[in-house]
Image (cartoon, grey):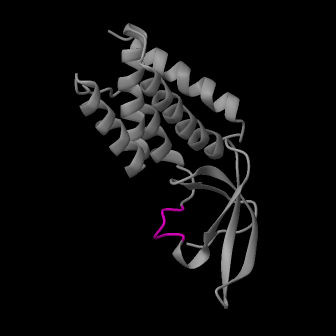
Amino acid sequence: MGFKVGDPVVYPAQGGGYIREIAERKVMGEVNTYYVIELIRKPGTIMVPVEKATELGLRPPLRGQELEELLRALGEARDLASGWPARQREIGRALSESDPLELARMLASMHKRHLNRPLSGTEHQQYRELIGILSEELALAGSGDLREAEDLLLSKLDEYANQP
């Protein structure tokens, strides 16, 4: 899959952003081509080798039906482990696998917990990280406005949490 300058992309290891440049760099005597991605939530840019982009998970943001599935998944909270260590492993696994639908379900679960009682410091960090990742996805699929995307995400979570 080839991207061009200006395309929105999601790089699971770092976040979402826009391709600002396709650059050639000499590394260990060999010239390689890289996508230079300007991140939208974290400051800075990252470089992803063009020839390994798909293998590394670089992809376009969700669109159409996939985006609708993501928003529905925010209403599919599942039971998390009751013990903190097991719960932390579940959340960590979801973050490392970077499946947007699973991240949405995990966020829905954490949001329900958050509404019922305060999250621990580490859980709150993971909760905020999930909100950030999914807000990037929504922003890149829509207007590009990260704050607007986060507001939509949180309103959907609240809407589902208030359903009987």
Q: Is residue 122 magenta?
A: no
Q: Residue 155, percent across and down?
A: 54, 19
The magenta region covers 53-58
- Seen from the viewer's position, the closer of residues 49 and 75 is 49
Which residue is drawn at the image coordinates 42% and 19% (left, top)? 120
- 55 vs 141, left or right, is left
Q: Is residue 89 above or below residue 79?
A: below
Which residue is drawn at the image coordinates 57% and 43% (left, top)? 137
- Seen from the viewer's position, the closer of residues 7 and 89 is 89
Residue 103 at least partly seen: yes
- 101 vs 19, left or right, is left
Q: Is residue 138 above or below residue 57?
A: above
Q: Residue 7, percent across and down?
A: 69, 60
Farthest bottom residue?
Answer: 29
User: How many badges with numbers are in the image?
Assistant: 0
Which residue is drawn at the image coordinates 59% and 26% (left, top)? 152
The quadrant where residue 40 appears: top right
The quadrant where residue 106 appears: top left
- 17 vs 20, left or right, is left
Q: Quadrant of the C terminus?
A: top left
Q: Is residue 13 above or below residue 115?
A: below
Q: Is residue 54 magenta?
A: yes
Which residue is drawn at the image coordinates 42% and 29% (left, top)? 107
Q: Main secondary structure of the magenta part?
A: loop
Q: Is residue 75 above or below residue 142?
A: above
Q: Residue 89, percent across and down?
A: 30, 38
Residue 74 at least partly seen: no
- Seen from the viewer's position, the closer of residues 8 and 38 is 38
Q: Residue 36, percent across and down?
A: 71, 65
